[in-house]
Image (cartoon, grey):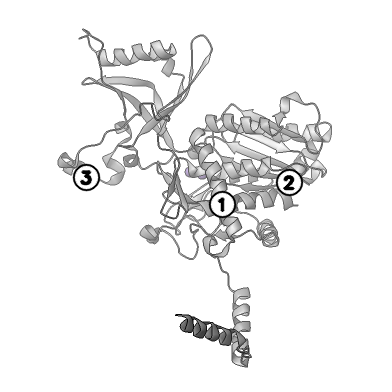
Amino acid sequence: MAKEKKTLAKALKEKTDKPVKEKSSKEKKNKSSKKEKEALLADYPNLWETRSQDDIDHTMAFAEEYMAFLDIAKTEREFVNNAIDALNDKGFVDIDTVETLKPGDKVFSSIKGKGLMFAVVGKEEIVKGMNILGAHIDSPRLDLKPNPIYEEDELVFFKTHYYGGIKKYQWTTIPLAIHGVIMKKDGTKLSLCIGEKDEDPIFYISDLLPHLGSEQMSHKASDFIKGEDLNVLIGGSKLPDDDSRDACKYAILKLLNKEYGIDEKDFVSAEIEIVPAMKARDVGFDRALIAAYGHDDKVCAYPALMALMAQEAPARTCVCMLSDKEEIGSYGNSGAQSRLYENFLVELFAKINGGYDELGYRKCIANTKMLSTDVSNAYDPKYASVSDKRNTAYLSKGVKMEKYTGARGKSGASDANSEFFASILRIFAENDIPWQTGELGKVDAGGGGTISAYLAKLGMEVIDCGVPVLSMHAPYEVISKIDLYFTYLAYKCFIENMK
Ligand code: MN
Ligand code: MN
């Protein structure tokens, strides 16, 4: 054994003592042409492969915090409430409570409890513009109809009307939770969240057993579960000795009245949302991905919130806009088309400027730069045919820069100006921020829109920029943790460096 060891040590020594062989001119040439090739050809590397262990450690830690936030912020109202708590802790105050603003001041304003604007005042003159991050915090779901409760054959259901673009069949036979608000007759607001705690009951939409499903399965997938079939099972018991009509419905209403002091008519004005009861979970042996409800668009809203909260004394005034109703067209006074969002910008301008000045405000907006931070589809090799492989976003290649959205001939697109887009890419290059690009699907395969067009209309520069999502708009969507972390860095880089 000893002899063998000695031989091995000797061999190793010889190996290290070997003179370094001079590289041949051919090898040198190959190396320089490889470098030249790298400089000329666009490359979008997988970030798990190219980033440091330190980056990966930060990625995993950031993902943990995001997942914990998602579990308590499934609806727009819950996102706003939790974001305001976080902002208060960081010293943000309601903009209504201050008369004037100076660099370093932090303010927010709730938009009907369903949207949120917040800002950190910068050192630069406000007329030179602001840097804005804008995401939406509503997600596809099922809303209750005005008269939701009914009994059929001794089972009690909620009737629903789906909200946003969903594949209806995906919402059957999964655990569902009830979130929302009911305004009681005494003027108080009842907030409901049932189905999230382990000890809570969940709610459920039944489907047909395969043994009897052959007729159902012969229909197109868009038809076999109809909108009117999305009825949520909420009970099926009776009170003792009650053989009257609707006895099961009465039993549920009696229970709700005892627990919450409400009756059937209180549902008419309520806003109750049915969402998946699943929590955010790691996906895969390597835990590289996250499955959760509502990544669209909380996976952009959360890093935008974190990027803004990391600011103390930015050069330009930084703003974050979290809007409601994006999934149904950004209408209503809590949607991105509402003037309430602009009202905040006006008030911010006036309180920094020492008074309102119409022309000054308009110049400020014309000089404002915005990232419309919304998700896009991630390329799925199982469904490769819907995407142009050369122009699509991939999981784990970083934030997706989307110059334009729209559908069929770019209809409805907000198309970012080349000058603006290139200026962001320069900043990303200077700060080592990886990015990728692409469209949502092949030409004529479909498409989509974001809030970008409504803000671009005011005159600011806007581009879409967000995290790629697998199974977008499904009850349980998937993203890559490394995309989430580098999207946070990209948003932070933008608001700190964009001029
Ligand atoms: Mn979205
Ligand atoms: Mn969406």
Who comes first in sequence, dot 3 or dot 1? Answer: 1
Q: Which residue lies furthest to the front in this view?
A: 2
Q: Mark 3 points at which residue?
A: 217
Q: Which residue lies furthest to the left in this view?
A: 211
Q: Position of residue 66 (x, y in %)?
A: 54, 42
> Disc 2, disc 1: CB below 8 Å?
no
Estimate the spatial distance between the alpha carbons at disc 2 and disc 1, rounded to whole Å: 35 Å
Q: Which of 102 and 126 is in front in this view?
A: 102
Determine if residue 405 is in view: no
Picture mark count: 3
Q: Which residue is drawn at 59% across and 26% down?
A: 112
Q: Position of residue 456 (x, y in %)?
A: 64, 46
* 469 left or right of 338 in image: left
Estimate the spatial distance between the alpha carbons at disc 2 and disc 3, rounded to whole Å: 54 Å
Can you say whether 33 is above or below 274 in the image?
below
In this rendering, which labeled residue sits more in front, label 2 or label 1? Answer: 1
Could you say which quadrant of the image residue 16 lies in?
Answer: bottom right
Which disc is residue 70 wearing?
none
Who comes first in sequence, dot 2 or dot 3? Answer: 3
Which disc is residue 366 wearing?
2
Can you say whether 320 is above or below 193 in the image?
below
Q: Callout 3: helix, strand or loop?
A: helix
Can you say whether 436 is above or below 456 in the image?
below
Q: Which residue is drawn at 67% across and 35% down?
A: 118
Q: How crowded is mark 1: few (under 14 residues within 10 Å), some or many (20 or more)?
A: many
Q: Residue furthest top?
A: 241
| CB at disc 2 and ligand 1 closer than 8 Å | no
Which disc is residue 59 wearing?
1
Quarter occupied by the N terminus = bottom left
Which amino acid type corresponds to the residue marked 2 in the rendered image? Ala
Q: Callout 2: helix, strand or loop?
A: helix
